[in-house]
Amino acid sequence: MKTEIEIEQLKRYIQIIKFLESELYAYRELYQYVRDSRKIPAAELAQELQQLKAVGWGEMCAKYDSAIQSLADESDQRSVDQALVHFAEWLPKGRPN
């Protein structure tokens, strides 16, 4: 059914954006951490990056999951149209990357 494909594609796009923004968050924070410390062992850098990825993922879940859930609840064309209107008006919460 075409409607299901459209909804699934939209959900997939939001998931991709969420993942990429989470990764960007971690790298940006790590860069700032390294820049400020000026001297840090490689093992500590790797550990810090993993911790920041977890924090970033949590922030991106809070930012994007409501839009993903609203799309998951749609099943017919009228609902798809409503979801697209909602999506057009939806703004992610939190700071931009």
Image: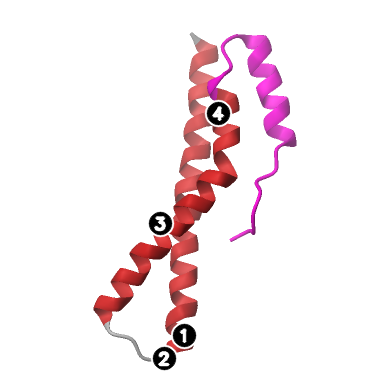
Task: Give the vertical position of 3 relative to 62 (above or below).
Answer: above
Left-right relation of 70 to 45: right
Badge 1 marks a residue whose secondary structure is helix
Report the front residue among 46 and 78: 46
The residue that appears at 56% across and 45% down in the rendered structure is: 62
Residue on which the image places disc 1: 35
Q: Quadrant of residue 41?
A: bottom left
Q: Nearer the viewer, mark 4 or mark 1?
A: 4
Residue on which the image places disc 4: 69
Residue on which the image places disc 3: 54
Q: How many marks?
A: 4
The earlier-in-sequence mark between 1 and 3 is: 1
Whether residues under marks 1 and 3 lie with C-beta atoms below 8 angstroms apart, the answer is: no
Badge 4 marks a residue whose secondary structure is helix
Number of residues whose C-alpha sits closer than 10 Å to that of mark 1, classed few (under 14), some (14–19) or many (20 or more): few
Can you give x and y, in whole percent of width and height, for residue 17 in the image? Answer: 51, 45
The earlier-in-sequence mark between 4 and 3 is: 3
Whether residues under marks 4 and 2 lie with C-beta atoms below 8 angstroms apart, the answer is: no
The earlier-in-sequence mark between 4 and 2 is: 2
The residue that appears at 54% across and 37% down in the rendered structure is: 65
Mark 4 → mark 3, Cα distance in angstroms: 21 Å
Residue type at numbered disc 1: Arg
Mark 4 → mark 2, Cα distance in angstroms: 42 Å
Q: Which mark is residue 38?
A: 2
